[in-house]
Image (cartoon, grey):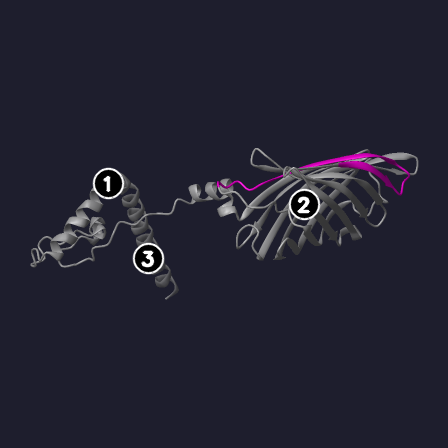
Amino acid sequence: MGVALRWVCVVAVMLWGTTGAAAQFLAADSDENDEELAGQLNEDGEEREAGGNSSGDTKGESWLSHIPFLKSPLLELPDLPLPKLPKLGATLVDTLRYGYGSKIVYFGGVDLWRAGLTSYGGLFYSANGADIDGFIFKGLIAEGVYAYRSGRRIVRGFYSLASAMPGWRLSSGSFDVKAYAGLDLQHHRTVPNDPGNRLRGGHAGLRAGVDAWWEPVPRFVMTAASLSASTIGNSYRVRLAAGARIADWFWLGPEAEIGHDDVYRQYRIGAHLTGFRFARLDWSLGGGYLTDNTGRSGAYGRFGIAARLHPGEIGRFAPF
């Protein structure tokens, strides 16, 4: 019984595969004759409406009748249009290029200071469209290098990070807040090897964040706040900023930032330039002075870009 059932399944799969391959071949072959076929179908429809030959001798030939083992004078097949396979490659390219109707924003940037460098990139997805409340998703990847002192030696740390965070967006007038949380993956290594660094190796945890934007005087004064925290190393980062609109070109004003984890603290004070529109990209810059709990201090610099690659323009600047 088991052997017979197995053979029945094999024969059914072969027939299904043959039928599918023939249909795909005919669909591809018919692309060059779409206009001619459409004209014939229109003429057939007009003849039927005008009361043409009712004997059925001129009935349109079904595409199914082109399949060899389905040809039969006793088998009447429905007159169906030729199938068209979806062009998944072209759809994917359009989605990545144009941002799926302004629902996707791509972002990236670099953060540099005396003892380290971080580069990051990702995408921000709004299910209901740009600047509209509802479900959101933020994907983030980053790599960086940092240096610290362990005893008398200088240790360099290298890390990679990837986060996938669904969330929700709420707004009212010029107030906009986004909250998200999800998986956080990190990998750290040190040169030379530092057994005392608990972040060495791979880790999985939870990352959460909140981004808020408010214009107390719309199009003239802005305030912004952001929080990002991870269970890996009990780390978090908080940034506060304010600014004024300069000649409708960009926002300019002060910023302050705090970074914290199990063993490290960093404090920043500086200025930012946000929302400068050039080459269909939103540019942001920041820089100033920092100090940390190891006694090191110096300058820091940061720049980032955000791109909504879609022909339509958005009415107002929206932070990402």
Residue holding disc 1: 33
The label nearer to you, 3 versus 1, is: 1
User: What secondary structure predominates along the stretch shown in magenta?
Assistant: strand
Q: Amino acid at mark 3?
A: Ala
- Give the mark nearer the N terminus: 3 vs 2: 3
Identify the image quadrant of the N terminus.
Answer: bottom left
119 up-or-down from 206: above or below:
above
Residue 90 x %, y %: 42, 41
Q: Amino acid at mark 2?
A: Phe
Please give the range of residues in magenta: 287-311
Secondary structure under the numbered disc 3 in the rendered image: helix
The label nearer to you, 2 versus 1, is: 2
Labels 2 and 1 touching (C-beta < 8 A): no
* 3D distance between C-alphas at marks 3 and 1: 32 Å
Is residue 128 visible in the rendered structure shown here?
Answer: yes
Image point 51% across, 44% down: which residue?
A: 99
Q: Mark 2 packing: few (<14 Cα in 10 Å), some, or many (20+)?
A: some
Mark number displayed over residue 12: 3
Residue 211 x %, y %: 69, 52
Image point 62% across, 43% down: which residue?
A: 122
- Give the mark nearer the N terminus: 3 vs 1: 3
In this view, the residue in front, 271 or 117, is 271
* 3D distance between C-alphas at marks 3 and 2: 69 Å
Residue holding disc 2: 220
Secondary structure under the numbered disc 2 in the rendered image: loop
The label nearer to you, 3 versus 2, is: 2
Image position of 223 (left or right of 193): left
- Give the mark nearer the N terminus: 2 vs 1: 1
